[in-house]
Image: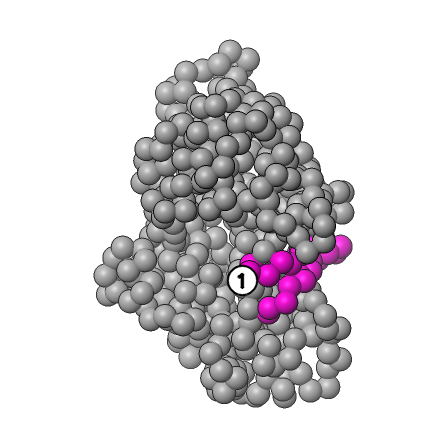
Amino acid sequence: MFHPHANSLPDPRICEQARLTRDARFDGLFFTAVTSTGIFCRPVCPAPPPKPAHVRYFASAAAAAAAGFRPCLRCRPERAAGASAWRSGNALVAGALRLIDGGLLDAAPVGALAARVGVGERHLRRLFVEVLGAGPAQVAATRRLLFAKQLLGETGLSVTEAALASGYGSVRRFNAAFRAAYGMSPRELRRGRAAPARGEACLRLPWRPPFDFAALLEFFARRALPGLEEVDAHGYRRRFVLHGEPGQLEVTARPGDHALQLRVRHPSVRVLPDVVARVRRMFDLDADAAAIAEVLGRDRRLAPLLRRHPGMRVPGGWDAFEMAVRAILGQQVSVQAARTLAGRLVQRFGVRGAEAGTVADFPLPEVLADVDVADLGLTRRRAESLRGVARAVRDGRVGVRPGHGLEAFVAEWTALPGIGPWTAHYLAMRGLGHPDAFPAADLVLRKVVGGGRPLPASELERLSQSWRPWRAYATMLLWRAA
C-alpha cells in the first residue's frame, strides 16, 4: 500500500491487482484507461478486463480525460468514491482542491486560485500535474462534467438546471462539453429513461469500505443541536441557510450499496455542489481506510482498536465557524455540557426560520461578535474568547482557509486570546478535515495512552510521530476506546 507522496497514483502492481479483482477499496483512488477503446473506467468496472498491454493507469479522472479518454457509460466514473484532498500530503494542493470543489474555477481563472493559496500560477499548475496528472483547469472541468452527469442520472433536474448546478455559465457550453466527452448530448443520454421525481435532489454519495456509519451517527447524536439537527439510528437531518435561503438535508444509508443517500431541499440548485462537499467532509467519505490502517496498524496500542472498529472515520462539521464556536464551548467540559451551551446559543442567537420559533441555521459571526453570551452559562473568560473569535472571523483575520498547512493554521488560531493548541487542533480535525491534526493536550488521550495515568502532552506528541499523517484517526480510535 502506498503512502501520501508527490505522485498520488498507487504502485502499478497494486493497480493491476485491484483492477483484476475489482477491489472496491481502490474505487476512486485511480482510474483505468483502455487504449483499444479510448475509454477510462473505475477499477470496479463490471466489463470484462482488458489485456494488460491495453491498460494505462491515471491518478485522477481529470488526468485520464486530459489524455483524451472518455468516461465509461457502464461503470460511470461519476459514481466513484472521492479521493481525499489531503491524499498527496501537500497542504497547498489539498487547499486548492477544496476551493475547486467549492466552485472557485467555475467563474474565475486559474490565476485567482493561485492567488488564494498564495503561490504563482505556474507553480500551482506544476504541482497539480505532479500530484494528479492534470492541471487545475482540467480538474475543475472534469469535476463539473462528472457532477452534471450524476445530476442527470440521479435527480429530476432539467438539463438547464443540471448545467447551472454544476457550475456551467450557459447551457450551450454544457452541451458542447458533454458531447465532446460522451459523444452525445445530455438529452440523448436521458432519452428512453424514466426521469426521477422532481421537487428535491436525491444523490448517491459513495464511500470505500470499510465504513462505520453507525459510529458517525452515534458521535453526531451526542452533539446534535435541538431545533437544528436530528439524529437517529437511521440517519442525520439538518436545517441550513445558503445563498440567503433556508434549506434542509437528510443523510441515510443505502442498504447493499457502498454509498449514502443525500436528500436536499433548497430553492436554488446552485447550492448542490457546496452541500455535497460539506456532507462528504462531515462523513469523511473520501478517507482511504486501507492506507490509514497500514500506518496505524503498526502500533501495538492502535492495532487492536483498528480490528475492533474497522471503518472508523473522523466526523467533520457543517461549517467552520460553527465548529470553532463549539470547540470553545467544549473546552474542559463534558460533551453533554458543551451541547447544552451550544443549544442555548442557537436558540438565543440562531438564524430564525420562516415559522415562528424555528431555527434555520447556526448563529452568524456578525451576530456573536457584538453580543454578551455570559448569561448562557459560560464563564466571562470563555464568553470573551467566543466573541473574539467571532470578530476575527467576521473581519477575515482567521478562518479555515484552504491552502494552510497544519502548523500555520494552529499558529494563526492560537494567536487569538483563549485559543490553545487543543482547540486549534480540534478545529483543524473537524472543521478543516486535516487528517494529521492531533490535540495532544487532551486529557482523555493522555490517560488512555498512559494506561490510566496521564502522560505529559509533550510525551504524547513524541509518541504520535509514528502515526503521521493519520493522527486524527488515531485520536478517534483512542477516544472510542475510552
Residue 237 visible in image: yes
Instruction: Examine the image and state in which quarter residue 8 appears.
Output: bottom left
301 or 374: nearer the viewer: 374
The percent position of residue 425, horizontal first and vertical second, equals 43, 34
**Residue stretch in magenta:** 242-269
Please indicate whether residue 117 sits to the left or right of residue 97 in the image. left
Residue corresponding to mark 1: 243
Relative vertical location of residue 471 with respect to residue 375 in this rendering, above or below: below
Instruction: Examine the image and state in which quarter residue 250 appears.
Output: bottom right
Label 1 neighbour load within 10 Å: few <14, some 14-19, many 20+: few
Please indicate whether residue 183 sits to the left or right of residue 307 in the image. left
Instruction: Examine the image and state in which quarter residue 131 appears.
Output: bottom left
The percent position of residue 450, horizontal first and vertical second, equals 49, 16
The percent position of residue 348, horizontal first and vertical second, equals 61, 39
Q: Secondary structure at mark 1?
A: loop
Residue at x 32% of width, y 68% of height: 110
Q: How is the image coloured?
A: one colour
Reply yes or no: does residue 389 show up in magenta: no
Residue at x 35% of width, y 51% of height: 403
Residue at x 57% of width, y 88% of height: 184
354 or 213: nearer the viewer: 354
